[in-house]
Each structure stands twice: as structure tokens, then as C-alpha cells.
Image (cartoon, rainbow, N blue to C red):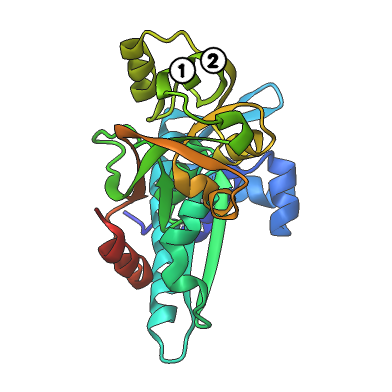
């Protein structure tokens, strides 16, 4: 059997990830007919059609999906190999590519990355996005690590390695005039408007259980999954906020916000999600060693 033609495979890979055959051909600087011929040659070699046409669209066949999975692994491994070997050369700069959920606390991200932020020999790339997009980028070796506050589901097809790296207490905070004097936690929760994390967050179930034990029916003015927005709403005095203090660290230091109480036994856990790599990023290895709880 003839060896796989990797040029043909790369053309197929580009089309499978492209918007259309025409646009992919333009981006690669080849004609559409030349691109089609390369893909036909690959289909002939593997013995299966890789695309089928539905109207004006090219859709992967079952064989095409299998080929794409292997092509992703082949080309991402090649990129990873080049990045790692370049870093090992004397005098070469090191790179670290970090993804973080768009809703994750910026203060936490800065604290985690602090050891590399002021290093002149490090190229740091930070990417925010949805969990699904970030995990795809991690799987295709376009990211070294993804920072989250909820561990992703894991099975045999998605072998994530989930590292708990920090635990932050959760507090009730607000503007000083709203907090007032000599009011119990139960009274504050019952009478003041509350800004709460969304029901999907790791914090919310503990807050709801506490409210239930106290017999409090809260007046919720906002449910927020974005820590930056939660911080802003607390600053704007919309209500009392349930939030890890690290999120509003600067406001607490300046006195703009005050911490009423830390909720007992309620923490937010932050995780670093990685994949097993033949050539692990040395910068990431050091960060995880120093941060893992």
C-alpha cells in the first residue's frame, strides 16, 4: 500500500475546517479545481469518499469524520513538536497559551499567571471564550491549558486532566451605606436586594441551601454568570453581592465595598484543564506544581 500523501491530507484538512471550497482555495492560493483534484486523489488512495455534496455544501461522510480526527491529531502534534523543540534551543523565547472561560474572574487569572507575567523571555497568549470552544482548542493543541471554575465532563473520548489549583472563600459584599450597622446576616439577606451567581455556578447551590435553612425568601435583582459583571453591579450599588473576595479585591481594599461575612464551608474552586502531552510545556508544569491545592 502506498504511503499517505500528507499534502493531499492537508488540503482535505483545510477544506474540512474551512467555510467553503471556494474560500479555502482562495486562502491557500490555489484554484478551486486544483483543490478538488487533490482531495479526489486522497479519496482514491484511502478508498472512500470523504465528502458528499448537499446542495451547495460539502458535508463530511463517516469516513471523512474519521479522516478529520486523525488529520487533527497529525497536524496538531506537528505544531506541538515544533513549538517545543524551538523552545529547547538556547536563547529561544518560551511560549504559554492559556484559555479561560469568558466569565472567569480576571483577578484569579492574574494571580495564577503571576510567576510568568513579568518574564521577558516568555510569550504569553491569553484567550477568553466558551468552554466548548476552549476545550476544542486544547484538544487540537492550540492551547496549553484552560482555566475554569467547573470541571468539564470527562469520558473515554475526552480524557481531560483536571487539576484543582485554588479554592476561594465566598462572601457577602456591598456598599457601606447599604450594609449599615447592627443587622444580622438573616436580616440583610431577607431585606436587601441580592446579586447572585447564576444557577449553573458552583457557588449557587450552597447559597440556595443557606437561604433555605434560614427561611429567607430572597429578593434577587440579578443572576450573573460573569464575575466582571457581578463586580460592576456591586460597585453600582444594585444590591448585596455573593462573590469570592478575590473578584472585588481592589474595591475591598479601597473601601468602596465592604465584606459583611464569609459564608461558612462555601468556596469556589478553580481548575486547570490539560491533556497528557508527550512534550509538556515546562512553564505550565511549574505553574501547576506551585498552584495545585
At x 60% / y 54%, what residue is drawn?
254
At x 39% / y 37%, what residue is drawn?
170
Label 2, on which residue? 191
Q: Is residue 41 left or right of residue 286?
A: right
Q: Nearer the viewer, residue 59 or 113?
A: 113
At x 46% / y 8%, what residue is drawn?
217
Q: Which quadrant of the view contains residue 102?
A: top right
Q: Nearer the viewer, residue 134 or 220?
A: 220
* Residue 71 image offset from top left, x and y in percent: 43, 50
Q: Nearer the viewer, residue 214 or 291?
A: 214
Q: Is residue 30 above or below residue 58?
A: below
Residue reaching furthest front?
182
Q: Please, what secondary structure does the residue beneath circle 2 have?
A: helix
| The label number, if any, that marks residue 95 in the structure image | none
* Residue 281 image offset from top left, x and y in percent: 35, 68
Q: Is residue 184 above or below residue 172?
A: above
Report the number of discs: 2
* Residue 168 image offset from top left, x and y in percent: 36, 45
Q: Is residue 105 visible?
A: no
Rounded to the nearest angstrom, the CA distance separating label 1 from label 2 is 6 Å
Q: Is residue 286 visible?
A: yes
Quick check: marks 1 and 2 in contact, CB under 8 Å?
yes
Q: Residues within 10 Å of mark 2 (few under 14, many from 20)?
A: few
Q: Please, what secondary structure does the residue beneath circle 1 have?
A: helix
| The label number, if any, that marks residue 187 in the structure image | 1
At x 35% / y 50%, what residue is drawn?
272
Q: Residues within 10 Å of mark 1 (few under 14, many from 20)?
A: few
* Residue 138 image offset from top left, x and y in percent: 43, 50
Amino acid at each position: 500500500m502506498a504511503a499517505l500523501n500528507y499534502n493531499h491530507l492537508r488540503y482535505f484538512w483545510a477544506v474540512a475546517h474551512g467555510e467553503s471550497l471556494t474560500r479555502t482555495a482562495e486562502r491557500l492560493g490555489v484554484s478551486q479545481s486544483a483543490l478538488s483534484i487533490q482531495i479526489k486523489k486522497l479519496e482514491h488512495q484511502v478508498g472512500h469518499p470523504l465528502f458528499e455534496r448537499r446542495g451547495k455544501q460539502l458535508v463530511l461522510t463517516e469516513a471523512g469524520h474519521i479522516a478529520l480526527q486523525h488529520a487533527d491529531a497529525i497536524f496538531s502534534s506537528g505544531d506541538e513538536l515544533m513549538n517545543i523543540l524551538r523552545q529547547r534551543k538556547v536563547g529561544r523565547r518560551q511560549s504559554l497559551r492559556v484559555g479561560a472561560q469568558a466569565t472567569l474572574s480576571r483577578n484569579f487569572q492574574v494571580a495564577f499567571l503571576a510567576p510568568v507575567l513579568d518574564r521577558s523571555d516568555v510569550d504569553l497568549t491569553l484567550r477568553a471564550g466558551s468552554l466548548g470552544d476552549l476545550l476544542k482548542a486544547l484538544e487540537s493543541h492550540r492551547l496549553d491549558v484552560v482555566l475554569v471554575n467547573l470541571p468539564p465532563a470527562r469520558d473515554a473520548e475526552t480524557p481531560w486532566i483536571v487539576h484543582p489549583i485554588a479554592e476561594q472563600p465566598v462572601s457577602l459584599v456591598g456598599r457601606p451605606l447599604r450594609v449599615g450597622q447592627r443587622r444580622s446576616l438573616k436580616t440583610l439577606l431577607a431585606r436587601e436586594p441580592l446579586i447572585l451567581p447564576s444557577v449553573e455556578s458552583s457557588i449557587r447551590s450552597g447559597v440556595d441551601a443557606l437561604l433555605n435553612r434560614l427561611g429567607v425568601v430572597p429578593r434577587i435583582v440579578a443572576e450573573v454568570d460573569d464575575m466582571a459583571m457581578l463586580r460592576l453591579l456591586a460597585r453600582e450599588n444594585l444590591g448585596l453581592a455573593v462573590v469570592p473576595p478575590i473578584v472585588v479585591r481592589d474595591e475591598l481594599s479601597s473601601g468602596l465595598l465592604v465584606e459583611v461575612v464569609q459564608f461558612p464551608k462555601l468556596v469556589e474552586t478553580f481548575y486547570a484543564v490539560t491533556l497528557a502531552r508527550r512534550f509538556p510545556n515546562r512553564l505550565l508544569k511549574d505553574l501547576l506544581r506551585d498552584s495545585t491545592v
